[in-house]
Image (cartoon, rainbow, N blue to C red):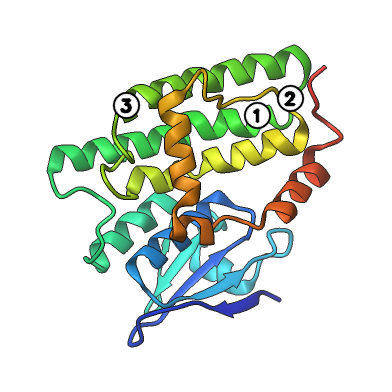
Amino acid sequence: MAAISLQTATMAEEVKLFGTWASPFSRRIEVALKLKGVQFEYIEENLSNKSPALLKYNPVHKKIPVLVHNGKPVAESLVILEYIDETWKHNPILPTDPYEKAMARFWAKYMDDKLWPAATKVVVSKGEEQKAVIEEIQEQLKTLESELKEKKFFGGESLGFVDIAANIIVFLLVAQEALGLMEILTEEKFPVLHEWYQRLVDDAVFKECVPPRERHLGFFKARFGSSTASK
């Protein structure tokens, strides 16, 4: 049975979020909803025993996250983020300029298409293969550093679409600590991105939507600890 808890802010609409506590993808949606001040009901899913409601609302992929707004389901985290931004116009997370909006979509997709597959690979690899994956991740971080330049956030002065999508970097660094991996995001190699990361995790709303640290470390150790560790 799915566990249910209630969150904060607006009244008249029914908003539900199906997710799991350790998933960066459902955590993205929490950040966006809280930035908008939207009241929502959070439903924790057990992915080894998915609820009938999740299967009903996402019959195609049968995955979290799923946002249900007044009975209408929306799946896939980046799609949901855009839906949230278009539905609740205040505190926008996407730029209004068409080119800047296209670039935000590009870099968010880069997170999912490039960085996330490498991040999931690094936690199950070891030895030389793991070192090669870390080098690949650092090349991707170098690309992100070049894009960030001197901006406070990827979206400019405030937390935006790309920054929310980049929450997978937080999950990657928790995995690094839990599994004793070689340090990935160093201040020496990535001064701009390192400063951005500190700013991100210090943001009040973002911080509220990051999994509890000790529980998160324990999750990675329990799930991947025996199969990794660089030699």
Residue 82 placed where, x, y %?
A: 31, 55
Residue 143 placed where, x, y %?
A: 40, 21
- Image quarter for residue 83? bottom left
Residue drawn at the location 60% of the way across and 32% of the way down: 119
Residue drawn at the location 61% of the way across and 78% of the way down: 4
Residue type highlighted by circle 1: Lys
Secondary structure type for disc 3: helix
State if disc 1 and disc 2 touch (CB < 8 Å): yes
- Mark closer to the observer (3, 1): 3
Is residue 132 found left or right of 155 in the rendered image? Answer: right
Residue drawn at the location 63% of the way across and 60% of the way down: 21
- Disc nearer the start of the sequence (3/1): 1
Q: Which mark is residue 24?
A: none
Residue type highlighted by circle 2: Ser
Secondary structure type for disc 1: helix
For disc 1, the marked residue is 121
Q: In the displayed structure, would residue 37 be above or below residue 91? A: below
Residue 94 placed where, x, y %?
A: 25, 50
Residue drawn at the location 62% of the way across and 36% of the way down: 173
For disc 3, the marked residue is 147
In the rendered image, which quarter contains the C terminus?
Answer: top right
Secondary structure type for disc 2: loop
Q: Which mark is residue 125?
A: 2
